[in-house]
């Protein structure tokens, strides 16, 4: 049986959504022989495989130029894209800097003289920040949104199981239904 290839991507988020994904416990065992985690923060493959992905799960908001590049590659190489958690779905906590503090001032506050030994701002390791933090769907089309901060493990497990059975999850009112 061909396994469904799944990637996960971590943008501007706290990793709580990935923790919730790992919390699906027995469901992981149920689906272990049907899926293959090809790329994720817990798998040591950093590049996106050229032959593409069945499903890519995105945690976090879009906060810098590197995130834009990653997301365009994700969309180009994934059949289905899931925005996992409120940071990916709405911008949530990372977007609280929007309209409050310009990116350069933010960097100076974080890396400036009062905070670090040499007070130099990063020029290589930290990608340039976007003026405004955005939810994933403002950058690429998203197929499924899973709300929550983080989404409950049970909901993530149900959604993955439904997809493996060829059903699309749909939000009806506040409940996730699987058609
Ligand atoms: Fe963390 Fe909540 Fe954002 Fe998920 S939605 S990355 S748990 S802050």
Image: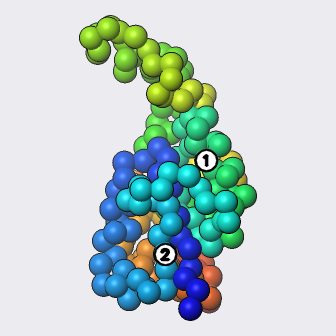
For marks 1 and 2 on the same chain, the one whose residue lies earlier in the sequence: 2
For image coordinates 50% across by 23% down, the residue present is: 124
Q: CA distance from mark 1 to mark 2?
A: 20 Å
The residue at which mark 2 appears reads as 36
Q: Are marks 1 and 2 in contact (CB under 8 Å)?
A: no
Does residue 48 appear in the picture of this structure? yes
Name which residue lies at 56% across and 52% down: 47
Determine if the C-beta at disc 1 is less than 8 A from ligand 1. no
The image shows a total of numbered marks equal to 2
The percent position of residue 125, horizontal first and vertical second, equals: 47, 27
The image quadrant of residue 77 is bottom right
Q: In this view of the protein, which residue sits in the foreground, 154 or 163?
A: 163
Query: How many residues crowd around disc 1 within 10 Å: few (fewer than 14), some, or many (20 or more)?
Result: some
The one of 152 and 25 positioned closer to us in this rendering: 25
Residue 25 sits above or below residue 138 on the image:
below
Q: Residue at x 34, y 76 (%)?
A: 24
Tell me if residue 166 comes above or below residue 17 in the rendering: below
Vertical placement of 25 versus 87: above or below? below
- What residue does disc 1 label? 70
Q: Quadrant of the N terminus?
A: bottom right
Pick whichever, 152 or 162, lies toward us: 162
Callout 1: SS: helix
The answer to which of 60 and 78 lies nearer the viewer is 78
Q: Secondary structure at mark 2?
A: strand
Q: In this rendering, would 128 be left or right of 85?
A: right
């Amino acid at each position: 049986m061909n396994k469904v290839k799944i990637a996960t991507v971590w943008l501007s988020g706290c990793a709580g959504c990935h923790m919730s994904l790992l919390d699906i416990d027995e469901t992981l065992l149920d689906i272990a022989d049907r899926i293959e985690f090809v790329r994720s923060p817990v798998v040591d493959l950093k590049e996106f495989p050229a032959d593409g992905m069945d499903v890519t799960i995105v945690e976090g908001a879009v906060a810098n130029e590197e995130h834009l590049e990653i997301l365009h590659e994700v969309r180009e190489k994934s059949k289905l894209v899931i925005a996992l958690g409120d940071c990916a779905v709405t911008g949530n906590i990372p977007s609280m800097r929007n309209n409050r503090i310009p990116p350069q001032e933010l960097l100076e506050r974080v890396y400036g003289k009062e905070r670090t030994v040499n007070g130099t701002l990063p020029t290589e390791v930290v990608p340039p920040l976007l003026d405004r933090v955005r939810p994933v769907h403002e950058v690429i089309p998203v197929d499924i949104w899973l709300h929550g901060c983080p989404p409950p493990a049970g909901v993530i497990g149900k959604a993955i199981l439904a997809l493996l059975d060829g059903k699309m999850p749909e939000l009806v009112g506040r409940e996730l239904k699987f058609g």
